[in-house]
Image (cartoon, rainbow, N blue to C red):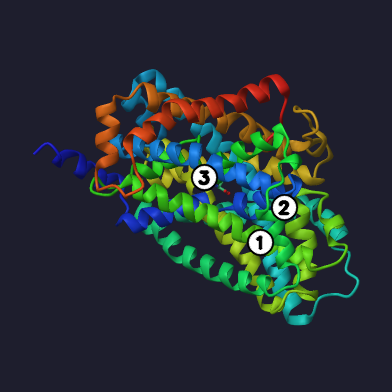
Amino acid sequence: MAGDAPIEQNEGRGQWTSSLGFILAATGSAIGLGNLWKFPFITWENRGGAFVLVYLLCIVAVGLPIMMAEILIGRKTQKSAVGAMKEAFGKRWGIVGGWGVLAGFVILSYYSVIAGWSLFYFTKALGWSMSGFPQGAQLGDDFTSFAAQGGLQIGLSGLFMAATMGVVLSGVKGGIERTARILLPVLFVILILLLVSALSMSGSGQALSFIFRPNFSELGMDGLLEALGHAFFTLSLGMGAMITYGSYVAKDQSIVKASGVIVVLDTVIALVATIIMFSVIFSVPGMEEQVGGSTVGMLFISLPELFYSTVPFGRVLAPAFYILVAFAALTSTISLLEVVAAYAIDEHGIGRKKATLMTGGAIFLVTVLCALSFGGSSGLSAFEIFEGKAGVFGTLDHLASNWLLPIGGFLITLATGWFMTREDSEAELALGGVPAWYSYGAWRFFIRFVAPVAVGAILVAVIFFGVDFS
Ligand code: PHE
C-alpha cells in the first residue's frame, strides 16, 4: 500500500487528532493581537465603514484563497515551511520557506512584549476589581512609566515566552492542540459576555454605524492597502504558519471546509472586538478625542478606566478581558514558535525539546531588545531605520508587516498558482470533501490572478509610494 509509509512518518512528526482539533489550533493562530489590538485601531484611524468593507473584500478575495493554498502545501508534503516549499516546487523554493521562518522569528520577538502587557494588566485589573479603581488615576502616565521599566518588561515577555515554549515542547497533540481546545472556548465565552454588556451601552448604536456604514470619501489609497496588509497578518498568512499547521492535517480531512471556518471565525472575532471597544468609547462623552493618539492607547490606557466607570459588570469583565487578550496572544505565539521550531526539527533532525529551547531562546534574545525599546534603554528606543518608526519594536513590526508577510504571501501565491499542476492542487483540495460554496475553478482564478495582483499592488505601493502598513 502506497499510503502506509507516509502515515507512519506522520505519526512520528505529530498530527491533529481530528479536523476540529486542527480548526481550533489554526483559528487560535489567526485570532490574536491582530484582532484585539490592531484591527480596532486601524478601523478607528481609517474612520470605519468603507475601510471595514474593503478589509472584508480582501479577506475573501486574497485571504481565503491563500489560506487554502498554504494548508494545501503543508498537507500535501507533510513537511514544515522550508521542506514543504522544496518538495512541492523544487529546491530553490526552500528559500521562501526560510523567509517564513525568518518572519516567524521576527514577529514573535516583538509580539511577546505586548502579550506580556496583557498579563500585567490582567493582574492590575484583578487588583482594581478587588480593592477599587483609584480615583483620579493618570493611566496614560502610568502606562508610560510601566513601559519604560526595562527589567519588568523583560520579565513579562520572558514569562510569556516561557509559556509559549512550554506548549510547543509538549508537541502537536499534547501541547498545541490541547491548549487551543481549552483556551478557545474560554475566549469565545468571555467575548460573548463582553459583547452583551457592550451592546447594552448607550454608545452601541453609534459604534455599529461607525463600523458598518461605509462612507467612501473617508477612505484613501493607503487605507485600501492597509486593509490588504492586515488581512495577511490577522490570518497568519505569508510566513508558513498555515503550511506548518497544514502539515499535521490527516489526508481524510477537508482543507476547504477548515479554511472557511477559520477565516469566518477570525473575521467575526475581529468585528466583535471592535464593536465592544467602540461601544464603550462612544458611551463616554469626550472619549473619542482621547483615544486616537496611539495604538496602545485604546487597549491599555482608555479601556481600563472605562471598565470601572461605565461598563455594566465591568468589575468582572475587566480582568476577564485582559486574560482574554493574553489567551488570544498565546495561541498565536505558539504558532509563531512552531514555524521556527518545526524547521529545526524537520530540516536539521533536532529533537522537539531541544529545538524548542534553542529557537525559543534565540528569539528571546531579540525580545529583550524589543522589551527595552519603550524607554527602558534610550538607544534602543530611539534607534531608527524606517522613517517615523523609532525603536527596535517599531522597526521590527514595520519590517514584518510591510516586507516579510507581503513578499512571502506573494511568492506563495505565485508558486501555488503557477508552479503546481492543476491535477495536484485540485486533487489535494478535494480530499475529505468540499462544501457547497467551493468551486475549484474560482479558487484557481483567485490564486493565479486576483491574489498576486492585489499583493503585488501592496508591494509596489510600499516600494514606490512609501505606504506604511504597520
Ligand atoms: N494572526 C495573528 C494575530 O492576528 C498574528 C500572527 C501572524 C500569528 C503570523 C502567526 C503568524 O494576532
- Label 1, ligand 1: CB separation under 8 Å: no
* Residue displayed at 55% across by 34% down: 103
Q: What residue type is disc 3 on?
A: Leu
Specify the quadrant of the image occupied by residue 363. Answer: top right
Q: Quadrant of the N terminus?
A: top left
Q: Is residue 290 left or right of residue 75?
A: right
Mark 2 surroundings: few (<14), some (14-19) or many (≥20) residues within 10 A:
many
Q: Earlier in the sequence, mark 1 or mark 2?
A: 2
Q: Mark 2 is on which residue type?
A: Gln
Does the beta carbon of the residue at mark 3 sit less than 8 Å from ligand 1? yes
Which residue position is annotated with label 1? 275
Three-letter amino acid code of the residue under disc 1: Ile
Q: Residue at x 83, y 58 (%)?
A: 288
Where disc 1 sits, the SS reads helix
Which type of secondary structure does the marked residue at label 2 adopt? helix
Q: Which residue is mark 3?
A: 235
Q: Earlier in the sequence, mark 1 or mark 3?
A: 3
| Crowd band around label 1 with a 10 angstrom C-alpha radius: few (<14), some (14–19), many (20+) | many
Taking the view exactly as shown, the residue that stands out farthest to the left is 1
Q: Pick whichever, 32 or 430, lies toward us.
A: 430
Mark identifier at residue 153: 2
**What x and y, as percent, mark residue 121?**
71, 64
**Closer mark to the observer between disc 1 and disc 3:** 1
Q: How far is disc 3 from disc 2 in space, using C-alphas?
A: 27 Å
Q: Which mark is residue 337?
A: none
